[in-house]
Image (cartoon, rainbow, N blue to C red):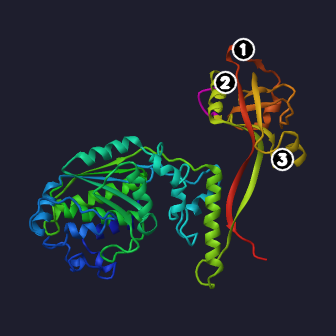
Amino acid sequence: MFLPQLLSSIRQLLRGSMGSRFGNARHGNGLPNSAANGPANGLYTITALGRWSILDAQLPVGSKASLTLIRRVAADKIKTIHVYDFDNTLFQTPLPNPKLWNSTTLGRLGSPDIFVNGGWWHDSRILAATGDGVEREEPRAWNGWWNEKIVELVQLSMKQKDALCVLLTGRSERGFSDLIKRIVTSKGLEFNMMGLKPEVGPNSERFNNTMLFKQAFLKNVMETYKHAQEIRIYEDRPKHVAGFREFLDAYNEQQQTSHSQSTRGPIAAEVIQVADISTNLDPVVEVAEVQHLINSHNAVVGSRSKRGRTERLVIRKTVFFTSYMIKPEDTKRLIALVSPNLPDNEVKYQANAVIITPRPCPPQVLEKIGGMHAKMQWGVMGIGSWENNLWAVSLQPIPPSAPYHTDSNMPSVVIATRRAARPSDVNKIQHWQPIPPENAFAFETEVGEKLCLAEKQAEIH
């Protein structure tokens, strides 16, 4: 749940008292914010609302009549407002990969305050690198990168004549307007409004965070379309779902309990939490893009005076082990092979690597096994366990004469552990139960490192 001061900010916003926070900011008609609760003659107009959208197209209008009538008719026609978040609600947006970065770096990548160029969510190169990159993905409409259920809902909103269809994201207007329009257009989706977070709002507002921007945006939409009877918001992040619900509850409470501050009456509000669909970039692409972030950051701080962020950054690598890496689909097959023998609880599954060395691989061993990224075939042979706390499958190289190196006495893959068992306890297994021929299979592995990358302040000598 949000901090108390955030809820206080919500109530300030709803009372129209933002002028004191934003230096007596003004609405589109030139009136100060302190007048926001007065008569609605021009405070919230379609023209003013259009300044919150990056689209050039006009908002819904009626027949060709006087400009005043066009705005009034448009407001009368809209009965429902549908608001869609972009990242991991409509579009499957890559997140920093927790298998690549340590926890500190994951937090720093997501922060706007570490990199002078903004970090993961503020550099359009990261989003543009989704899939095979924008030049290849745009012609095929980023196929496979959408939440198709939400796409279907957007298409229904597009067809509903009394619905205002809105895309709302905290991505920066300056950095992402063109790219997000290209992504959405490639899919054939059309919105009445597309709201991206501006550096300065239409009424000179400055927003400390994404939630405050989205709440100000929504208030302007609801006040402009006073005849809308409902609003639906689709959002993936639980924290934002809670923030929207608190905001709308406070908005409706004001409309119901305070006649002097009621501006349009309550609105039926529903915030739908969308299941997480996040994914990751290709690891090689991700490391390259983060390195570009760091290079851009270092180029800026290298030319600055001592004021501001001046620390140079580098990527440092820690190797936990070298292994024959197992593909995810083969991990599932291995687990299925052993799962009938596993207890129902406290089990931690692995089955993702045949350990070569629990550290960076010595050059002579790496040369023996064919080098980094060398392929190796294995056949499953037997199932073993140790004290009902560790389960493993023994392996045989294919062909049997193929050169290999493993950290265990017998080539094997640890399938699952529990309690205090460690992967190295696989060497304590004394007996292996042969796998019936009808259940046996072979799989391919690739030599690689389990590593963790961290961006750290560079040492200046």
- Residue 386 in view of the camera: no
Magenta span of residues: 341-347
Label 1 sits on residue: 437
In-front residue for pair 38/53: 53
The residue depicted at 27 percent of the width and 62 percent of the height is 57
Give the alpha-carbon distance from disc 1 to disc 3, as whole Å.
34 Å
Mark 1 lies on a secondary structure that is helix
**In the image, residue 204 lies at what x, y percent?**
33, 77
Which numbered dot is residue 361?
3
Residue 397: give x, y in percent of width and height: 81, 28
Q: Residue 338 carries which label?
A: 2
The amino acid type, in three-letter code, at marker 1 is Pro
Q: Relative to 381, is 289 on the left or the right?
A: left
Which callout, 1 or 3, points at the residue further toward the start of the chain? 3
Q: Which of 383 and 90 is in front in this view?
A: 90
Disc 2 to disc 3, C-alpha distance: 29 Å
> Quick one: label 1, few (<14), some, or many (20+) residues within 10 Å?
few
Q: Earlier in the sequence, mark 2 or mark 1?
A: 2
Q: Which residue is drawn at 83% across and 47% down?
A: 361
Based on the displayed image, in which of its 4 quarters is residue 441 positioned?
top right
Q: Which of marks 2 and 3 is nearer the N terminus?
A: 2
> Relative to 444, does residue 210 appear above or below in the rendering?
below
Kind of residue indicated by mark 3: Cys
Q: Cβ–Cβ below 8 Å for labels 2 and 3? A: no
What is the secondary structure assignment of the residue under circle 3? loop
